[in-house]
Image: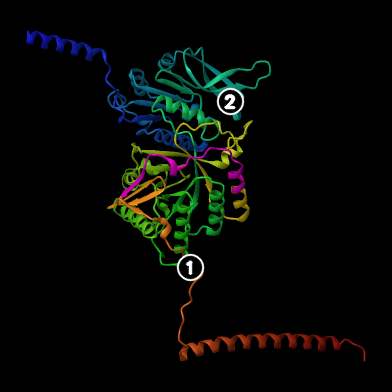
Amino acid sequence: MKRYLLLICLSILSILSIHIPVQADDNRPVLLVYDSENIYYNGSKKIDSVQRMLTADGLKIKTVMLENYRSGELSDNKYRGVVTLINWQEADLSNDSFTHDRAKFSGTKLHIGPNLQDDELEGLHAKKGMIIRQQLTLSDDGITEQIPYTNRMEYLVDVAGSDKYGVLNTQNVGNQKTLPYGVKVDSNAFLPFWNTSGLAVNCEEKLIADLFNTKTDSRPLLVINNVTPTSNLEYLDKLVDDLYRNNIPFAVSATNVEGNTNQFAYKKYMYSLRMIELKNGIIFMRVPYLYSYTGKEINAQNLKATMSERLQLMVRSGVYPTGLSTPNHWNQDAVLGKVGLKSASNVLLLPDPKTYPKVKQTDYSQEFDKAYYVMSLKDLDKAKTTVSLTKANNLNYTLPTALNIKMPRTLSELRKVEKSVSRSELNWENPAAEDNSREMNFAKMKLEYHVRTYFVNGNEQNISDTAPVQKKHKHKEYQETGLNLILSYQGKFLTVFILVTLIGFVLLIYKGRKVYWDKFKRK
């Protein structure tokens, strides 16, 4: 009897195992395939933006150029999704192997740009339309933005049962069209183009979050960028005081150095960073500028030593970074990413500079507990919208997003930054009020930040105990030796001699001029 019961139970379990789907492995990366960098039209900026937004969604990414794609690479057991980015539509580039593998792929699919294929349209349950030479506006959450002139754009028609993210309107008088911007149908999605700033970013974040990993973050983090030991610390202190006085939480991306750390200027810099911690600000240590390695090989050993030394110098000065600030290309590099970024649980992902040295580029990027997609607050101010994006407090950022202001270099820049922030009505993220801890682990040092409290290797740090740096140099007293006296009197003698000589020359010129003109006077 027991044997029969056992067989019946096994049979039921086998039936259930057939009908219950196995949950996908969330650690599988997303494959990003782009057709061209399109350097002439700054297309690398779009690739960088897509990479950073996918990373902000907590995803691992493998990035491959279309012509380098190899047959069989895209499969269900290796990837959870694929993103196709058409970056140069005029070239009409294709790869039959990729098109074939993507059609068979059953995971999540996102197509950005033109050249939609039949299998993609089938997944979106839609047909394809085309508009040529149009001025468009994008609307979302009651805000409308004027989009740059569009030469040619594909769009979806007859889309049934889809989720839509933003609405595009043409401005043809008498023949106006209303089109969806982002479209999602089950695990398939489409964006007709990709913008790196403005209202489109909010639509792109919502679509990607719904498509891959739903996030609950909705408040942007205010970041002061480009803070270095050579910055005008007086302006930095004034800006920080202004933010603290107005109860605005913020972060600072601060660069450190290894040399001249005994100088007064360095101690003053560390003091300014300590004051930031006391005034509800947090510090992200900016990774080294690689151009400073002139004549020095960039390898894992040198980089690890540099990062470790800079971090320890900050900690010894009472400054406790809560994460790293890095250009995106570090996360696309085997050496820079593995050695430089793996120590931080959260990072600020800055846009890449136009040119940068490549150490050991890799197709794979890392994932983080929290990676911020960084945009410029100034760009939001400049967007041609019906309601300023800095005053639209109902406009949520679905993924971790940081709005960046550059460190002011002049008094007028300081005034503009203060005015821009004070006029903003955004609901800023407050790291001091969040439940999750921010951690950094480097060498044998573990830094942790939680609810305005700093820990080093588990020991709580009292940041208010740090003594202020002296405002002026203390001049060293020296004995009046014979040599010092000689040099002192010699300097005074030379000063007097030069003054007397100059006065003599002036008198001689005056006298000579008078004698010369007397020759022409009648007697």
Residue 71 in percent (x, y) is at 30, 25
Residue 313 in percent (x, y) is at 37, 59
Find the distance from the CA under tag 1 to the CA under tag 2.
54 Å
Question: Could you tell me which secondary element the residue under label 2 belongs to?
Answer: strand
Residue placed most toward the observer, 211 or 68: 211
Residue 382 vertical placement versus 103 (above, below): below
Residue at image point 60% right, 44% down: 422
- Give the residue at the far right of this rendering: 523
In reply to whether residue 434 is colored magenta, the answer given is yes
Which quadrant, please, contains the N terminus? Answer: top left
Is disc 2 surrounded by few (<14), some (14 to 19) or many (20+) residues within 10 Å?
many
Q: Is residue 286 left or right of residue 364?
A: right
Is disc 1 surrounded by few (<14), some (14 to 19) or many (20+) residues within 10 Å?
few
State the image quarter where residue 208 is shown. Answer: top left
Which residues are drawn in magenta? 418-441
| Number of the label disc, if any, that sits on residue 139 | 2
Residue 317 visible at all = yes
> Which residue is label 1 attached to?
470
Name the kind of residue labelled 2 in the image.
Ser
Which quadrant, please, contains the C terminus? Answer: bottom right
Name the kind of residue labelled 1 in the image.
Gln
Residue at image point 57% right, 22% down: 168
